[in-house]
Amino acid sequence: MPLLLKFSFYSHSHSSHFLSSTAMAMCSSFCPQIPHRLKGKPFFSFSSKSKPLFLPFKLISSQASNVTAKADALSTRVGFLGLGIMGSPMAQNLLKAGCDVTVWNRTKSKCDPLINLGAKYMPSPEEVAASCDVTFAMLADPESAIDVACGKNGAANGIGPGKGYVDVSTVDGGTSKLISMQIKDTGALFLEAPVSGSKKPAEDGQLIFLTAGDKSLYDTVAPFLDIMGKSRFYLGDVGNGAAMKLVVNMIMGSMMASFSEGILLSEKVGLDPNVLVEVVSQGAISAPMYSLKGPSMTKSLYPTAFPLKHQQKDLRLALGLAESVSQPTPIAAAANELYKVAISHGLSDQDFSAVIEALKAKK
């Protein structure tokens, strides 16, 4: 009973963390002490027929289940492919939580900081997938996502029955379905789980996961998603997660373009753009993005949290999605052209807020 009371604050909802930063540090020392009678089914089980552990009180049953899930999560072998701006902090949070993590990246030097934190390394996606129970992939674009999953030495060559592949990259629905088909042909399970959030939310474990695919795999990897994010949504069939992410990023890209116009217009008519940022942050159109990006934009500084080239890629994919269902998106189309101009000015690797420079060039 004392153990159950110790973990009473871990009650889990659909959209909350199952581990606080303190709990992550404590878990590795407490979980091994769980009495055998409290342990449920093995963590990496995809059976939908398994009956839940029965205890007399619903609350205690929930707490015991959470403790068991955490203990089993820590013993599951997790692979992580792609250690860029987003992938590196996501994998790092898994390591800090005590997970057994194996990493791969095209440029091996990007793996070194994680290896120093205790990660294992494999020289190919195929070997990562073969050695792990579940493999996450965070790649820059559809082409990279397909190559890492399905290409030579790709994950599909090493994965198989009893394993899972979770693609957290932002890609179009067609790409996601292609990867899903290749993975499932091996007998493994597939989940798409693109994230809403950029560098800081990734570092802080505050991402939002937009998932679709095998529900049993979603349930299995939920503890890992809760380490890396603040909320998660299950959206049904493969393609729905990709579509949701593209819609969200289409809105975001359009908002940033309009915000850029407002900053420059206020400056042109003699207003202080910093005051504009403050006014916007207190009104009905307030958004965290404006408060976060505005102060640096007025100084022409664009520290990269979400590269501009990726925002333009997402707008392009969103426009393709809209075209496929004959949905007019004139505002997003105009914003996309502005990002293309910014890329032509050499701003691809700057933060997407650097789109404002494309408007300055038109003066």
Image: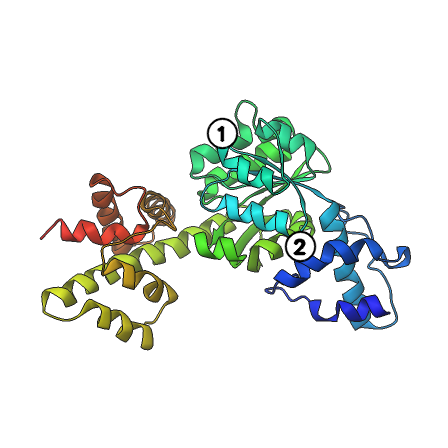
Taking the view exactly as shown, the residue that stands out farthest to the bottom is 283
Q: Is residue 276 above or below residue 18?
A: below
Name the residue tied to disc 2: 223
| Total residue callouts | 2
At a point 54% along the width and 48% down the height, the residue shown is 90
Q: Earlier in the sequence, mark 2 or mark 1?
A: 1
Tell us which disc is closer to us: 2 or 1: 2
Does residue 111 appear in the picture of this structure?
A: yes
At a point 77% along the width and 47% down the height, the residue shown is 47
The disc at residue 179 is none
Quadrant for residue 332, please give it: bottom left
The disc at residue 147 is 1
Dot 2 surroundings within 10 Å: few (below 14), some, or many (20 or more)? Answer: many
Q: Amino acid at mark 2?
A: Pro
Contact (Cβ within 8 Å) of mark 2 with mark 1: no
Q: Nearer the viewer, residue 48 or 100?
A: 100
**In the rendered view, does 119 fall on the left or right side of 34?**
left
Measured from the top left, where is residue 25 in percent x and y? 67, 57
The kind of secondary structure element at disc 2 is helix
The kind of secondary structure element at disc 1 is helix
At a point 36% along the width and 68% down the height, the residue shown is 287
Measured from the top left, where is residue 106 in percent x and y? 49, 30
Does residue 198 appear in the picture of this structure?
A: no
